[in-house]
Amino acid sequence: MKDLIKLKNNFFEILKQKPKILVVAGLIGIALIFLSSYFNNGEKKENTNISKITAEEYCESLEQKLSSQIKDVVGGDVKVMITLESGIEYIYASESKNNESEVEDAYANNNQKSQKQKEMQSNYITCKDENGKEVPLVVTEIMPNVKGVVVACENGDNEVINSAIKSLVTTALDIGENKVCVLGTQIQ
């Protein structure tokens, strides 16, 4: 215990004699704190991009959800196929700049006339992805409209079940009944 007290007193005596050591130690500490922010980038990543899915993944997700809903209503084996009108549309963040300039036209009789020309310049706003590659910043994903739906299930040819399935599909996907085909399957 006496050694610790002696060591502590010696440390403070050194600091009193050489205040430059304290200043240097403080600067080194500040530099280490500053540098540590660069090494912790992997831990504090924020995902600035909306997770992009493909049209196929979107379609499969719709088919699974619809199959599940139809199974809950009619029971039995249900298969659903959905077709889409297009792919997924992405809206990117951009900035626009308007440039206006005056141009003078000279005529043969030395009369001059000035005209204003407007020029618009647009650039996408980019950010870096996980790999450090510059990519445009996605603001919105617009999912494609459903083109048609085919449902095959047991007793799908029954008028009551057929009507119930068409009602479920048209309501769930907000499409017209003319875009829905319900078929019965054979039990073997």
Image: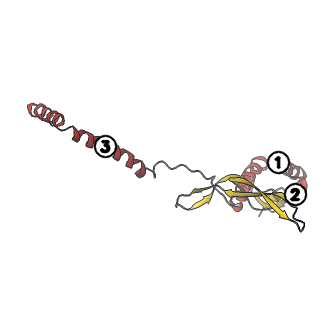
Q: Residue 118: where, in percent of width, then height? A: 79, 56
Position above or below: 65 against 55: above
Q: Secondary structure at mark 2?
A: helix
Q: Residue 64: where, in percent of width, then height? A: 71, 55
Q: Residue at x 71, y 53 (%)?
A: 97
Residue projecting furthest to the bottom: 108
Work out whether mark 2 precedes mark 1 in sequence or the reverse, and give the earlier one.
1
The residue that label 3 is drawn on is 27
Which mark is nearer the camera, 3 or 1?
3
Mark-to-mark CA distance, 2 and 1: 13 Å
Tag shown at residue 22: none
In which image quadrant can residue 19 be found? top left
Which mark is nearer the camera, 3 or 2?
3
Callout 3 amino acid: Leu
Observer-nearest of 26 and 159:
26
In which image quadrant can residue 135 be found? bottom right
Describe residue 185's horizontal placement relative to residue 3 as left or right.
right
In which image quadrant can residue 99 be found? bottom right
Q: Residue 144: where, in percent of width, then height? A: 77, 57
Q: Is residue 78 visible to us here?
A: no
The residue that label 2 is drawn on is 179
Mark-to-mark CA distance, 3 and 1: 69 Å
The residue that label 1 is drawn on is 168
Work out whether mark 3 precedes mark 1 in sequence or the reverse, and give the earlier one.
3
Callout 2 amino acid: Lys
Describe residue 19's horizontal placement relative to residue 135 as left or right.
left
The answer to whether the residues at label 3 and label 2 have Cβ atoms under 8 Å apart is: no
Which quadrant of the figure contains the C terminus? Answer: bottom right
